Image (cartoon, rainbow, N blue to C red):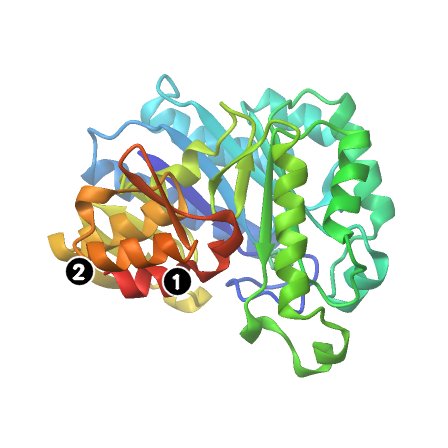
């Protein structure tokens, strides 16, 4: 099974962020939280003794605010429950300001074999406007430590269209990043409109510019051997995120800690997103996914990832219409959105299912 751990602490809150977290934390708060995790994991394995551990993903929040000792303590809980015989990937999300050679060495000694680095942009003005704790100076230091460090499987997060970014920002950022380190995976996200505070409006690129930023970033990566295996995710072959793929193929996954979502035995549920609710053990559930909903989700995930079998789509006349209009292409009996119109993916899916 795939395990997600939500670390709800960040040194400061970015202005576009909607995750459940707090920038106010101290040793006691982290201690209380880790102790709650131990209970949660123990409860889970006592009711699911048959489960083996395939991946562990430290997400957040900013997992790299945890010390090596705290991460070791958490991983030890898993190890004592089941051992790591079946595990293939342990990922830790990190912010550049936390990365040093010593920290990377400590992580690699703990079996962490994949590091995800939240760069977002190298434009200092944008970093300041959106409230990131880093400057491009701390990002460069992190990249230099990574280049010399023991973890080879590194992913970089970028955001297209942040306020204040320059034209061709993504390509210029990728060029600089790859001149310092050799990431094997890159995610390029686009912010949703509702994430923008009104004060950003005068500084935002228009929608066409954001799309062209994403597209030129994609082409830059493709020219270096990367391929898009999900709408926002690009990897060299063999370096796809095994953990994230579990979300898109309906594998069972279990989230621990605040606000974490789970999908176990066909049921989707989530922990409370308030600390008090979480400590009281409150959960929200969507119930067991019906086979109709599962089919719809499979089609939605398919369009975002490896394509949808033509046989699964009932509305063939609409497929043909979209194909003629250049929105879809069909290869070896599989239907894909074209790169040009990938941004219309939600509209395309809405018309087809
Ligand atoms: S570092 Fe990441 S998780 Fe933390 S506030 Fe910023 S965007 Fe949100």
Q: Residues within 10 Å of mark 2 (few under 14, many from 20)?
A: few
Secondary structure, mark 2, is: strand
Quadrant in the picture for the N terminus: top left
Residue 148 image point, x, y percent: 78, 22
Placement of 328 over or under 113, stated as above or below: below
- Residue at the image position 42 percent from the left and 65 percent from the top: 273
- Residue at the image position 42 percent from the left and 36 percent from the top: 243
The answer to whether residue 205 is left or right of residue 16 is right
Q: Is residue 171 visible?
A: yes
Q: Residue furthest right?
A: 137
| Ligand 1 lies under 8 Å from the Cβ of mark 1 | no
- Along the line of sight, which residue is nearer the eye, 93 or 165? 165
Residue 174 image point, x, y percent: 74, 40
Q: Nearer the viewer, mark 1 or mark 2?
A: 1
Q: Earlier in the sequence, mark 1 or mark 2?
A: 2
Looking at the rendered structure, the number of numbered marks drawn on it comes to 2
In what quadrant does ligand 1 lie? bottom right
Q: Contact (CB < 8 A) between labels 1 and 2?
A: no
Residue 281 image point, x, y percent: 31, 60
Q: Quadrant of residue 13?
A: bottom right
- Residue at the image position 40 percent from the left and 25 percent from the top: 79
Q: Residue furthest top?
A: 85
Query: On the image, numbered disc 2 is attached to which residue?
Result: 287
- Along the line of sight, which residue is nearer the eye, 110 or 154? 154
- Along the line of sight, which residue is nearer the eye, 212 or 267? 212
Placement of 148 over or under 209, stated as above or below: above
Query: On the image, numbered disc 1 is attached to which residue?
Result: 346
Quadrant in the picture for the C terminus: bottom left
The answer to whether residue 75 is left or right of residue 268 is right
Residue 315 image point, x, y percent: 19, 58
């Amino acid at each position: 099974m795939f395990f997600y751990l939500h670390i709800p602490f960040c040194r400061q809150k970015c202005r576009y962020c909607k995750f459940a977290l707090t920038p106010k934390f101290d040793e006691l708060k982290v201690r209380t939280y880790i102790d709650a995790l131990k209970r949660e994991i123990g409860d889970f394995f006592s009711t699911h003794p048959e489960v083996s551990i395939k991946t562990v993903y430290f997400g957040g929040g900013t997992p790299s605010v945890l010390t090596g000792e705290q991460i070791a303590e958490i991983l030890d809980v898993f190890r004592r429950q089941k051992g790591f015989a079946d595990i293939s990937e342990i990922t830790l999300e990190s912010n550049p300001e936390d990365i040093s050679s010593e920290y990377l060495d400590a992580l690699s000694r703990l079996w962490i074999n994949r590091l995800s680095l939240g760069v977002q942009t190298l434009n200092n003005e944008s970093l300041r406007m959106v409230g990131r704790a880093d400057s491009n100076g701390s990002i460069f230091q992190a990249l230099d430590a990574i280049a010399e460090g023991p973890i080879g499987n590194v992913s970089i997060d970028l955001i297209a269209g942040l306020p204040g970014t320059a034209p061709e920002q993504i390509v210029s950022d990728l060029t600089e990043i790859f001149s310092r380190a050799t990431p094997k995976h890159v995610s390029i996200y686009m912010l949703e409109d509702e994430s923008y505070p009104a004060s950003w409006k005068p500084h935002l690129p228009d929608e066409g510019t954001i799309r062209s930023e994403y597209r030129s970033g994609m082409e830059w990566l493709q020219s270096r051997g990367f391929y898009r295996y999900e709408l926002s995710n690009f990897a060299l072959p063999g370096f796809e995120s095994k953990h994230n793929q579990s979300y898109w193929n309906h594998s069972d996954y279990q989230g621990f800690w605040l606000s974490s979502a789970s999908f176990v035995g066909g049921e989707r549920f989530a922990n409370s997103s308030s600390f008090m609710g979480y400590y009281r053990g409150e959960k929200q559930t969507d119930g067991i996914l019906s086979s109709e909903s599962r089919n719809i989700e499979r089609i939605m995930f398919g369009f975002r990832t490896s394509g949808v079998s033509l046989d699964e789509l009932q509305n063939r006349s609409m497929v043909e219409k979209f194909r003629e209009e250049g929105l879809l292409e069909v290869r070896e009996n599989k239907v894909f959105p074209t790169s040009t119109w990938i941004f219309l993916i939600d509209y395309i899916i809405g018309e087809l299912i």
